[in-house]
C-alpha cells in the first residue's frame, strides 16, 4: 500500500510532495520514548523508499518531515479528541442541548489523537464541549 506524504526540506524551505513506496521494514512493536517536554510517546521505526526523489537532492544537514496517512475516508463524522473522555469502558462526550450539557455515549473508530471518527452517538452539526471540566455534569447549564 503506497502512501502520499508531504515533506518540507528545512535547509532551503522548499515545499514538495513526494510519493513513498510501500514501507520495506517496520518494527514489530512500538517503544516508549520520553520527549524533551517530558511527554511519554509511543514510537514505531519505519524504513521507506522515495520513488520520485531527484538524485542528489538531499545532503548533509537536510531535514525531511514526513506526515504519513495510514487511513482516510471521505464523509466521516469526526469530533475533536479534546471533547472525548472515558467512563468505564465507554467513550463519552458532553453535547449541548437547550443550553445544557448532556452526557452522551459515543462509539469511536479511528482516533489520531487530534480527531476521532464517530460511528454512533452523534449527528453532524451537534455541538460538543471541548476540555470538559470536572464541574460539567449532565444537565448543567452552559
Image (spheres, rainbow, N blue to C red):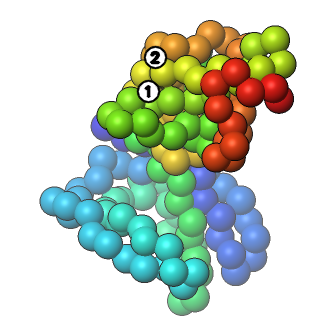
Q: Nearer the viewer, residue 121 or 46?
A: 121
> Crowdedness of circle 1 by 10 Å Cα count: few (<14), some, many (20+)?
some
Cα–Cα span, label 1 and label 2: 6 Å
Q: Quadrant of residue 109?
A: top left
- Residue drawn at point x = 42 percent, y = 50 percent: 20
- The vertical placement of 142 against 125, above or below, is below
Residue 39: image x %, image y %? Answer: 50, 73
Residues at badges 1 and 2 in contact (C-beta under 8 Å)? yes
| Secondary structure state at the residue bearing disc 1 | strand
Is residue 51 left or right of 31 when viewed as pictured?
A: right
- The vertical placement of 42 against 118, above or below, is below
Residue 61: image x %, image y %? Answer: 58, 88
Is residue 76 left or right of 98 when viewed as pictured?
A: left
- Residue drawn at point x = 59 percent, y = 23 percent: 103
Q: Which residue is mark 2?
A: 119
* Quadrant of image for the C terminus: top right
Residue 32: image x %, image y %? Answer: 32, 72
The answer to whether any part of residue 54 appears in the image is yes
**Which of the labelled discs sits on residue 108, or is there none?**
1
Amino acid at each position: 500500500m503506497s502512501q502520499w506524504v508531504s515533506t518540507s526540506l528545512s535547509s532551503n524551505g522548499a515545499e514538495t510532495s513526494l510519493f513513498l513506496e510501500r514501507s520495506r521494514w517496520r518494527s514489530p512493536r512500538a517503544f516508549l520514548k520520553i520527549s524533551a517536554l517530558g511527554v511519554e510517546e509511543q514510537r514505531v521505526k519505519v524504513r521507506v523508499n522515495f520513488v520520485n526523489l531527484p538524485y542528489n537532492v538531499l545532503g548533509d544537514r537536510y531535514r525531511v518531515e514526513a506526515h504519513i496517512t495510514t487511513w482516510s475516508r471521505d464523509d466521516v463524522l469526526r469530533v475533536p479528541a479534546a471533547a472525548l473522555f472515558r467512563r468505564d469502558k465507554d467513550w463519552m462526550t458532553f453535547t449541548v442541548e437547550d443550553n445544557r450539557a448532556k452526557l452522551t455515549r459515543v462509539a469511536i473508530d479511528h482516533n489520531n489523537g487530534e480527531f476521532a471518527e464517530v460511528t454512533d452517538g452523534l449527528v453532524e452539526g451537534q455541538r460538543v464541549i471541548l476540555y470538559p471540566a470536572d464541574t460539567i455534569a449532565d444537565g448543567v447549564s452552559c
